[in-house]
Image (cartoon, rainbow, N blue to C red):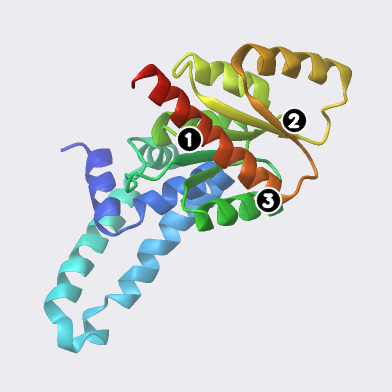
Amino acid sequence: MNKKINLEQELSYLGLLDKAREIYFELGERAVLSYIKSSYRLLSKVYHPDLNPEKQNMANLTQHRLNRVSRLISNMSDMELIEVIRKGNLKKNDGKKKILVVEDEFGLQDIFRNIFIMEGYDVIVAMDGIAGYDAFCQFKPDLVFTDVVMPNLNGINLVKKIRKIKPDIKVIYTSGFFEIEDLKNNLNQEVLKYNYRTLAKPFKLSAMLTMVNEYFNDAKENDFIRGV
C-alpha cells in the first residue's frame, strides 16, 4: 500500500490527523511539521509499556503503530508529509452549520473561533486566502467569514475562486479599510450582485453573531419558500 495512505490511516487512528489539518490551515507548513514530528514522539513516551503495566496489550499495540509512524515519517520528505495533511476531508460534524474563518490576525483568529464554537457552530480557521481556499475545498463550509485585506490572496479574490466551486456560498466580508475607494467599489459590486454581508472592524461580537444567525435564518426561509 502507498506509504502516504499508510501514514494517513495511522495518524487518523492516533487522533492526530484532524488536528494537524487545522494547524496547517491556521499556521502553515512549518507549524504542522513540528506538530506531527513532536506528537508521535510524545505519544511514544505516554504509551510505553513500562509505564502501563496494567494495560500492556493496549500499550504494546499503540507502541507498534507509533513505531510504524516513525518509520513512515523517516522515509518521507517534508513535502510528502504536507501532502498527507492536505489530503481528504476534515471530520464530519453532527449536523452543525460550518463556518470557515479566514483571518490573518492571530488574536482575532482565536476570538472568532472560540465565539462561534460556543454558539454551536463547527469552525475551521485559515491564516490567509490561499490556506482559506484549501480549507474550503476540504471543510465545505456553509459560510465563509473572511477578512478582505490579506497577504497572498485577498478576501474578494478568494471568494471569486470559491464561487467557481459553490456559486451560492454565503459570505461575510470584514475589514477596517472599507472606505478605501478601490476596495469600496469592488465590495459594492460583490454585495449588490451576490447579497453578501459586510462588517466594518472594529465591531461588537454580538453584532457579528446576530448577522451570522440572521444570514442562516434568511436562507432557511428562502429554502422553505422555494420548497427545498
Secondary structure at badge 1 equals helix
For the residue pair 202 and 137, the one nearer the viewer reads as 202
Question: What number is the disc on residue 78?
Answer: none
Q: CA distance from mark 1 to mark 2?
A: 18 Å
Q: Amino acid at mark 1?
A: Ala
Q: CA distance from mark 3 to mark 2?
A: 23 Å
For the residue pair 67 and 147, the one nearer the viewer reads as 147
Earlier sequence position, callout 1 versus callout 2: 1
Instruction: Tell me the residue that label 2 is attached to.
Output: 149
Residue 62 % position (x, y): 21, 67
Secondary structure at badge 2 equals loop
Instruction: Tell me the residue that label 3 is attached to.
Output: 206
Q: Amino acid at mark 3?
A: Ser
Whether residue 157 appears in this view of the structure is yes
Instruction: Establish if 156 lies above or below 128.
Output: above
119 horizontally vs 83: left or right: right
Residue 80 % position (x, y): 38, 37
145 horizontally vs 80: left or right: right
Q: Residues within 10 Å of mark 3 (few under 14, many from 20)?
A: few
Residue 106 % position (x, y): 68, 50
For the residue pair 142 and 62, the one nearer the viewer reads as 142
Task: Name which quarter of the figure residue 79 lies in.
Answer: top left
Q: Nearer the viewer, mark 3 or mark 1?
A: 3
**What's the residue at 16%, 74% (across, down)?**
58
Q: Residues within 10 Å of mark 1 (few under 14, many from 20)?
A: many
**Image quarter of the C terminus:** top left
Question: What number is the disc on residue 135?
Answer: 1
Instruction: Establish if 69 lies above or below 93.
Output: below
Q: Amino acid at mark 2?
A: Val
Mark 3 touches mark 2? (CB < 8 Å): no
For the residue pair 116 and 105, the one nearer the viewer reads as 116
